[in-house]
Structure formats: structure tokens, C-alpha cells
Amino acid sequence: MARHTTFRFRLDPTVEQSVALARHVGAARFAYNQCLRLHLDAREHHRALIRRGADADTMDRARDAVPWSRFSLINALNRWKASEDAGRRFLVTGGGVTQVEVTGLAWRGEVLAEVLEEGAVDVSRGLAAWTASRSGKRTGPRVGHPRFKKKNHTAGSFRMRNRTRGNWSSIRVGTADCLRSVTLPKIGTLRVQEDTRRLRRMIANGRARILQATITRGVRRWWISITVEAAEVHPAIQHPARPAHDTTGWVGVDRGLHALVVAGTRDGTETLRVQAPKVLAVGLRQQRRLARAVSRKKRGSMGRRKATTRLARHHLRVRDTRQRFLHQVSNQLVKTHDRLVLEDLNITGIMSNRRLARAVGDAAWGELARQITYKQHWRNGQVVIADRWFPSSKTCSSCGHVKKVLSLRERTYTCGHCGLVRDRDLNAAANLAAWAEDHTRGEEVQDGDRQAAGPVINACRRDGTGPHTRVSETSPDDAGTPAQTAPAA
């Protein structure tokens, strides 16, 4: 197994199954909040000992008792579930004697225990990100402290791990009676609306192994995302390996607002130009109308809930349209080019400009870079990132002269030294391709993009380099990336 990918399906649960799913969503939120409360109480207890001037041994024991890691939080939650604080009841005997019976969390048997444990894992990840951000070990925007989750009737999710025992698996796809189904522990068999043939075939042939499943409650819809550890894509669709001394074949990818993607080679040959769809700007008038309808409804009323649902469905439609378009563009790039050069754009800084923030967010430059990076990894291609301070737009791709000033209104680059007249975006793409050729000679190419960081989807491990691995490969049909419901590749 060499890569991680996710299959996403839309669920079609019954009324009873919807209630069970909602119960697990609430249990995950409850476990998250309770673990965070246990952590904060332990920290407050340690601070109280410091204020009282306790001895060093007592303070050390109190500090060690503060749950920070996922295992300590899970253990603390398990102890609390069986304690008197979680649940108790009073019993009166025939002689009038009152006794207290510790019941613990009364409803913990109605939900899967792994759902509660995954809530503790989420708290641990939030605390780790917060501490890493405070100490400067984490790059990017400052991460705040985890906060308590509110109850939301239109959103929420829970996660469960897959457990195997021989040929048996706790999460199964398809049954003999219904192939379009997913079986989950404590919930049963759920029907899905999409075809599961590709995933079932990969699992049956030993080319995929289910790791976990995440169930998400959307706007009047339920979704399931099944994360699998899959084999590498078939060699027939992988890019052929280049010699170590070969520095040619680089294609620069310039991302912009007028044209979302302009790809070109060093000599100025344009290989791809895609205009930005601007799906947010197109639906902005409808979004404002729906937002006004929400603000006019009374808080807590049924009318406000319906208006909020309509607004949420509009946002979902915009997001799905943009995501589908980005997958199409990234697929076209990685299928036709084995070497791509991306800019290191300061997206966070650009978003601070109120005149450009909406358009930049609508273009989704970071998401496009993320998709290009992991898809190129899967196809054995190369992606490099140009230096952030490299003036790709101001530099002449013919003579190398750098302009001091280049406004956003100038869509055509005109060089005052050599007289070159070329499209602004194509000139930047040619400069990126030239930068890659000049900076990869005699050096090992470093793949990746800081804007495309991801904890799971970018993981790429060669065959036989870790536990639970074996040499195998997928078929050419398993490497496509249909939108939404099929695996990304």
C-alpha cells in the first residue's frame, strides 16, 4: 500500500437510522466538550496549587495529571464515564434506607465507544496545534485555544475506526442483497446513492484497506467519507521517470484572478489557459437575498431555521461547483505534464486586502495547489515551488529585465529593453519554468508546496516501506477522479 485516498458517498438512511446517526453526532460533540472540560479543570487545579504554595512534589503530580495527549484524554474520559459525576441514582429500600448507586454515563452503551474516543483525539489535536503555534513551531496563522462546540441541528460529524479480525471488517461496503450500501457498527447497513463498485473491487482484490469512516450531517443530507490505504496507481498512467541530469520539461503554472491558470514553457509556449469561474460572484446577489431573509426572521423560530437551511444549501452549491471545477483543472494539468512549477503565494497576506479578499477566496488558489501536489505525487510526477520573492510577473522572459512597477491593470507585458510584448500571465508562467530549470541542475528536486499541506491526503509511501504493506498496484480504471463521489487520484 502506498497512498491514502477517500471515497465519498451520499447516504440514504431511514428515519430510525437518521436518529441513530444524530445520536452519534451528539455523542461526539459531548465527548469533545467533556474532554476539554476535564483538561481545563485539571489545569485550573494545578494553578490553584501554585497559588496556595503547595510543595514541589504535589505540584509535579498535579501537572502530570493534566491530560494532554490522546491516550491520556481517552483514559480520563473512560474514568469519568464510570464515575459518580457522570451518573447516579438513589435507591430506597423497604426499611426506608436510601442508597446511592453509581450508574455512570447511562447512554454510553447506545453509541459506539470509538466515537467518544475520537472526540478525545480531536481535543488532543487542537491542544497540540495551540501549543505549537504559541511556541513558534507551527507556521501559518496563529491557532487559538480549542473551544466548546455548540449544538447544531444542521451540521456535525463523527468518526469511527475500522477494526479487522481475519477476513472480518467492522466497516464493510456492499452486501449480497444491496451492493450500494455501507455497514457500520452500532448503526447497521446504510444505503448509499452512488455506485460502490470501484471501492468494492479494490478491496476484494487486496488493493485497498479501509482505515476509517467519517459521517457528516449536511443540509438535509448525510455523507460518508471512507478513508482507505490504497496501492499505487497503475504504471500505465504514471509519468515515466526522467534521468537525473535532465532539467528540461518544466511547465510554469501562474495562478491569477482574471485567468485562474495559465501554464507555459520556458520559450513562451502556452499549454493551458483556464478562466476563473467566479462561482461566488455569480451567486452573490442570491446570497445577499437569502442572508437578508435570515436576518428578518425571529431567533429560534421555525421560519428562521428554514431560511438558514436555504442559505446553507446555497453555500453548499457554490462550494460543490468550485470543487468540481478545481478537480477538472488539476486533472488536466497532472495528466499532461510531469513537471510543474507553482508560485509560493502569500495567500494569507493577500486576503488581508479587503479589495481582493473575496476574489482570492473565490479563486481558491490554495486548494488548487493542494490538488495538483498530491495528484502529481500519485502519478510519479514532480512539483516544485518557486521562491516567494522571485518577481515572475515583473521579469521579462526574453532578456531578464525586471520592471520596477507593474500595476494590476497592465494585462500585457511590454519590455522596454528588448521590445517583447507578451501576455502578462504567460510571461510569468515562462519565468517560472525557467526558474525551475535553473534551480534544479545537479540538485535533487524537492516536491511539495507549503500551500498544499495536508495530514493524510498527501501521504505517499513506497511499496514495502512500512507495516501492513505489500507490493501491488491498482488497475487503470481505479485512478480516475470523478467529482464528489468517486476517489480523488
Image (cartoon, rainbow, N blue to C red):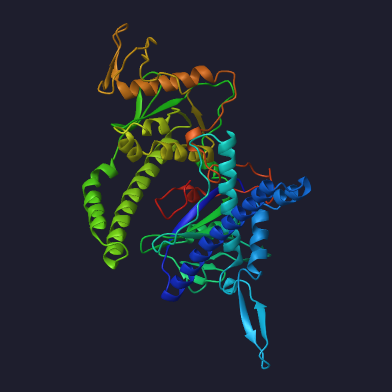
When the figure is inspected, residue 409 is found, relative to residue 31, above or below; the finding is above
**Can residue 317 be seen here?**
yes
For the view shown, which residue lies furthest in the bottom direction? 94
Label count reads 0
Left or right, 201 with respect to 45, comes to left
When the figure is inspected, residue 110 is found, relative to residue 415, above or below; the finding is below
Q: Position of residue 261 (x, y in %)?
A: 35, 32
**Can residue 205 be seen here?**
no
Q: Position of residue 201 (x, y in %)?
A: 53, 59
Q: Nearer the viewer, residue 285 or 236?
A: 285
Left or right, 288 with respect to 266, comes to left
Q: Position of residue 266 (x, y in %)?
A: 41, 19
The image quarter containing residue 351 is top left
Q: Position of residue 163 (x, y in %)?
A: 63, 62
Q: Nearer the viewer, residue 104 or 237?
A: 104
When the figure is inspected, residue 347 is found, relative to residue 1, above or below; the finding is above
The image quarter containing residue 307 is bottom left
Q: Nearer the viewer, residue 357 or 483?
A: 357
Left or right, 204 with respect to 417, comes to right
When the figure is inspected, residue 219 is found, relative to residue 376, above or below; the finding is below
Look at 63% across and 72% down and name the residue there. 104
For the view shown, which residue lies furthest in the front direction? 52
For the view shown, which residue lies furthest in the top direction? 417
